Every structure is written in C-alpha cells, then in structure tokens.
Image: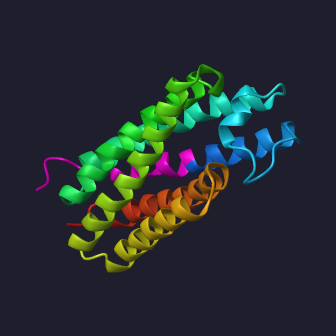
Amino acid sequence: MKLLNDRSTGFAWFGILGVAVFMTIWLFASAADPAWEFGVNTLSEFGISDTDAKLFFNFGCMITGILMAVFGVGRAAYGKNVGHSVGGSMIFVAGVALALVGVFTMDQGYVHSFVAVVAALFIFMAMIAIAAGNWAAGKKVLAGVGVVMVFMLSAMAIAYDVAMLEAYGIILAMIWFLLESMNMILSSGKD
C-alpha cells in the first residue's frame, strides 16, 4: 500500500499552463508593440515598451514564473530519481527568476540581466539533469530529446546574437516543458 499518492499529474498541468500563458503573452505583446521584431529585439524589450506590451509581458512573466516554479516543485517531489529531483529544483529556481524578470525590467540594469541569465542557465541545467534522470528511468527517447536540445542551445549560443538566441531558446524550452509535463502525466503512479 502506498502511503503517499502520486500527484505529479497535477503538477505537470502547471508546466503545460505555464507554456500556454507564455505563448499567449508573447503573442499579445507582439501584437501590442508592432515595432518589436523577432530575433532583432529581445523579449525583455517588451517590458519597457511604451505600449500595452509592457503590461502583458511583465505580468505574464510573473504568472509564468510562478507556474513554472510550482511545476518544478512537483518534478522535484515526485522525481523517480536524483536527476529528476535535481532538475525539478533547478526549474523552481528558474521559475522564481523568471517571475523576477517581470518585476525588474530592462531599465533597472544589472538586476534584470542577473535574473534573466539565472532563469536561462537554470532551465539549461535542468534540461541536462532531467535528461540524465530520464536515461536512468529507462526513457531513452526523452533523454535523447533533452540531449539534442542541450546541444542545439549550445550551438545557438555560439552562432547567434542574444536576441536570436533568446527567441529560439525560449521556443525550444517551451517544447521541452511540454514534453516533460507529458512525461510526468504518462508516468504518474508508475514505479
């Protein structure tokens, strides 16, 4: 008899909802600020826009960050191994940092840069840790997807400027979050 029920499915939905919220705010912010260009401007420029894009982006980062942090707590608590638990803890830190991106906008200088870099690095490190966890759990395809994404992000960091890296990196991260959320849902209750 299990004393602790596996509630990872509920936490996984926070990951899916976080991706949906971020995609929505990105679309709304880009519609509100037609001067913003994909790969030319960073997403953080929405946060200091003279348009309503500022509201969409800043509040959206706060909401997405909270949802991502909750997802990370679930990934850490219900991890099947150390890789999953460590990765979940890193997602939690990244979520908190993303929420702070909406609080400390680009016009606040180093503080904004610090929290944005922390969010990105901790998501990157979580991808590595969870890929190792997926490998250990026998989920070779998901581990492989994580490894491919890590290599793609590494190559893009070398090849692209910050605006292009950020845009494509966020798209890859959203795909990865959806895959890992589905991974949690499909493995819920299994040993």
Q: Nearer the viewer, residue 162 or 7?
A: 162
* Residue under the point 53% across and 32% down: 113
* Residue under the point 58% across and 64% down: 159
Q: Position of residue 1 (x, y in %)?
A: 10, 56
Q: Nearer the viewer, residue 113 or 57?
A: 113
Spot the residue most to the left: 1
Magenta stretch encompasses residue 9: yes
Q: Position of residue 157 (x, y in %)?
A: 52, 59
Does residue 44 appear to the left or right of 119 in the view shown?
right
Relative to 186, is 68 above or below? Answer: above
Spot the residue most to the right: 34
Q: Is residue 78 visible?
A: no
Q: Main secondary structure of the magenta part?
A: helix
Q: Position of residue 114 (x, y in %)?
A: 47, 32
Q: Nearer the viewer, residue 98 or 117?
A: 117
Residue 90 found in image quarter? top left
Magenta stretch encompasses residue 186: no
Does residue 76 appear to the left or right of 174 in the view shown?
left
Relative to 159, is 47 above or below? Answer: above
Residue 31 found in image quarter? top right
Relative to 136, is 38 above or below? Answer: above
| Span of residues in magenta | 1-18
Colouring scheme applied when the structure was drawn? rainbow
Q: Quadrant of the C terminus?
A: bottom left
Q: Total marks drawn?
A: 0
Q: Is residue 154 visible?
A: yes
Does residue 28 appear to the left or right of 78 in the view shown?
right
Q: Position of residue 33 (x, y in %)?
A: 85, 37
* Residue under the point 51% across and 31% down: 99
Does residue 185 appear to the left or right of 136 in the view shown?
right
